[in-house]
Every structure is written in structure tokens, then in C-alpha cells.
Amino acid sequence: MPNYSYPLLGLLHLIVWIWAIVDILKSGKSVGEKLLWILVVLLLPLIGLILYILIGRGK
């Protein structure tokens, strides 16, 4: 029986990653802050997403 959990986790990660990039681009942050957050999310895939959700989104 095949294990489908890894592809599903990968798809979930891709969806959250795309959401984070769109959220960063739509935010009211300066261009420099947007670029920095996009680099963090791209270069540190899982940790960058967690950091953005906890710290970067603000209120």
C-alpha cells in the first residue's frame, strides 16, 4: 500500500509558501521589508514560513 503522506505534506507546504509570498506582496510593508521577508521565506523554506507567520505578519 503506497504512502501518500509525503506528497500531501509537500502540497500543503507549497500552498502555505504561495500564501505567504502573496501575503508579503500585499502587505503595507516597505519594498525593502518585503524583499527581506521574501528572501527569508525562499532561502529558509520551513523555518522562514514559521518566522513570517509568527513575527512578520504583525497585527
Image (spheres, rainbow, N blue to C red):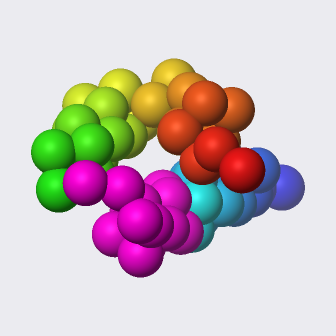
Q: Dividing the picture into quarters, in which one does residue 22 lie? A: bottom left
Is 16 situated above or below 37? below
Is 32 situated above or below 16? above
Residue at x 61% of width, y 30% of height: 55
In magenta, the rendered stretch is: 17-30
| Picture mark count | 0
The single residue placed furthest to the right in the displayed view is: 1
Q: Horizontal and vertical percent for residue 15?
A: 57, 68
Residue at x 53% of width, y 39% of height: 56
Q: Dividing the picture into quarters, in which one does residue 51 lie? A: top right
Quadrant location of the N terminus in the rendered image: bottom right
Answer left or right for 31 relative to 28.
left
Is 36 situated above or below 47? below
- Can residue 18 be seen in the rendering of this structure? no
Is 29 situated above or below 45? below
Q: Horizontal and vertical percent for residue 39?
A: 22, 39
Look at the magenta stretch and give its main secondary structure.
helix
Residue at x 16% of width, y 45% of height: 32
Q: As rendered, which of 48 and 30 lies closer to the eye?
A: 30
Answer left or right for 57 relative to 54.
left
Task: State yes or no: residue 24 in magenta.
Answer: yes
Residue at x 25% of width, y 54% of height: 30
